[in-house]
Image (tube, helix red, strand yellow):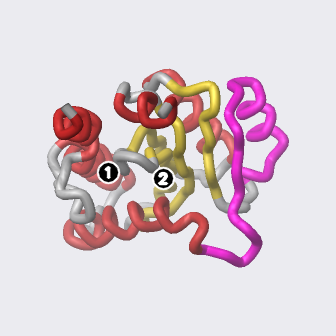
Amino acid sequence: MSFLLDILSGVLANTISDTSYIPTKQGTLYLSIIRDLFDLSIVAYKTSTRQSIKLVLDTVRLALEKEEVTAELQLHSDQGFQYASQSYFALTTQYGITPSMSRRANPYDNAMAENFFSILKSECIRLYKPETILQAQTLIDEYIAFYNHERIQLNTKAIPHRKADTILSDMI
């Protein structure tokens, strides 16, 4: 019941993280996300022209600044170099986050993060084909705002940030 109360109160409990890349004519923009596994919203994201440990650490810090988290927050990821680094484990330990990693050679463990990247690329990036890093950044900013606040999720028929309210009203 505590888990359900955390969800309904908007407290972050189970998340997934990954990075992807957005190609442009000017170069590659890397995108790091943290996705809430309950409402499928993008809790935090950061971009950089370099795929680095700092990109992932900054994304985790941003999520913790923006969201209230449970004492049992789990953050799942693949076994990428950023998530296997000592800096990542030190940061998760510092904030009391339980890191969880995919099994070796099993991409299905991180499917919910990959799912978002696929949606972003098919509904936005491939349609608009950004030529510059700035254009790609702007598209990502606008799309994630749309995704979190307007786009209806096909599996739940709800908008991510409104799901807890919808569930709560259905229970009453």
| Residue 8 placement (x, y as % from top left) | 35, 31
Q: Residue 98 magenta-drawn?
A: yes
Comparing 45 with 128, the one in front is 45
Left or right, residue 107 beside residue 43: right
For mark 1, give the secondary structure: helix
Q: How far apart in space, not on screen, are marks 1 and 2 (Cα)? A: 9 Å
Query: What amino acid is at disc 2?
Result: Leu
| Residue 103 placement (x, y as % from top left) | 73, 68
Asked whether the beta carbons under mark 1 and mark 2 sit within 8 Å of each other, the answer is yes
Query: What amino acid is at disc 1?
Result: Ile
In the picture of the structure, the residue carrying the numbered disc 1 is: 140
Please report the residue visible at 25 percent of the width from the left and 42 percent of the height from the top. Answer: 163
In the picture of the structure, the residue carrying the numbered disc 2 is: 31
Q: Mark 2: few, some, or many residues within 10 Å (few <14, many ≥20)?
A: many
Q: Quadrant of residue 109?
A: bottom right
Report the magenta residues as a range.
Answer: 82-107
Please report the residue visible at 62 percent of the width from the left and 41 percent of the height from the top. Answer: 74
Please report the residue visible at 56 percent of the width from the left and 51 percent of the height from the top. Answer: 17
For mark 2, give the secondary structure: strand
Comparing 63 with 24, the one in front is 63
Left or right, residue 33 beside residue 93: left
| Residue 49 placement (x, y as % from top left) | 53, 51
